[in-house]
Amino acid sequence: MPQTNVDEVLAKIARFEQFGDNDSHVVFEKKSLQREIQNDIKKLKEVSISDGYMTDMIFNGIQKNEAKCRSYYELAKQQGAYSRQLDWNFALSLGYLGYESEASDIFLDLVDRDLGEPEIYRGASTHFSDMGYFDKAVQVLEKGLKLKDCLITERLIVCEKLANFVDQLNIPKNELNRYMSTVQEFQQKKGLYFKDRRYDFFDDGHETIACIEINTGKSIDDVNRLNDELFDLLASKDFTADIALNFVTMFR
């Protein structure tokens, strides 16, 4: 009998979350998935108690069971769960429960304890924006760009997120330019080097390319041509806030 995989359980939990609280027309499907997840978590605990408690923590966070969520977090720690992953998922669970401020503190602590993974910066900025803390999201992105090698796709992600922050914060143009100059300054210090421009972008940015193709109806040739323009644009020393916003508009 195949073992229950923690990633598969987390994927089912993510599917369960998408149902929402008021989806009365899919009650049976939601209940069925709930039972399936509960059974999977039981099996998972037979393989890895810490992973079992961690997934149970997230699942109860989504279901607004605060006491169980916090209890499983402590039990997972006692069982020696991988601390960064556990803390990250606990912060997500707190977000589900409505404790955005407490979740925010954990995300900031994880950024300060960075273990060399760029996903920490990108992920934390995404969750901050989801919680409405756009100033913290920008702060984390800036910190990530200063500390990490600035890949071209990371600059793309910065631009896309920045456009969303501008929409919701009404950031003045001079502040926007100040932020983008941080990106530009870092790029000029480090420089950009690509063995194969197209390979690097397709390797890290394939989801964005797929979105362009689907959302704009452009042919693959048009998308490829846009990619070439993208590289020239992001690698340019004249990269500014206005260019960034114009670039993001091409994806909308």
Image: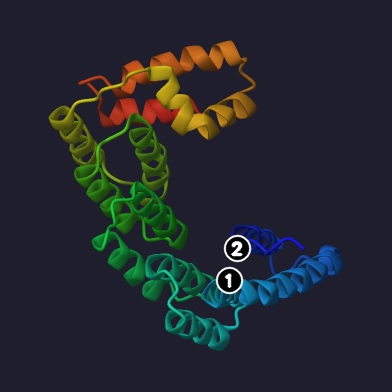
User: Residue at left 32%, top 71%?
Assistant: 105
Q: CA distance from mark 2 to mark 1?
A: 8 Å
Q: Is residue 12 above or below residue 74?
A: above
Q: Tag 1 or tag 2, which sits nearer the N-term?
A: 2
Q: Give whichever of 168, 183 is nearer the camera.
A: 183
Give the left or right position of residue 217, taking residue 160 as reference: right
Mark 1 residue element: helix
Which residue is disc 1 drawn over?
Answer: 55
Does residue 58 show up?
yes
Residue bearing the label numbered 2: 6
Which residue shows up at 55% across the image and 76% down it? 57
Q: Is residue 95 left or right of residue 113?
A: right
The image shows residue 108 at horizontal and vertical percentages of 30, 64
Q: Position of residue 103 (x, y in %)?
A: 40, 71
Q: Quadrant of residue 60?
A: bottom right
Residue type highlighted by circle 1: Thr
Q: On the rendered image, what quadrant is the N terminus found in?
A: bottom right
- What's the residue at 42%, 38% (across, down)? 160
Circle 2/circle 1 CB separation < 8 Å:
yes
Q: Residues within 10 Å of mark 1 (few under 14, many from 20)?
A: many
Residue 24 visible in image? no
Residue 89 x, y percent position in the rendering: 48, 67
Which labelled disc corresponds to residue 203?
Answer: none
Point 25% across, 19% down: residue: 236
Q: How is the image coloured?
A: rainbow
Badge 2 amino acid: Val
Q: Please state if 146 lies on the left or on the right of 28 as rendered.
A: left
Task: Determine the secondary structure under disc 2.
Answer: helix
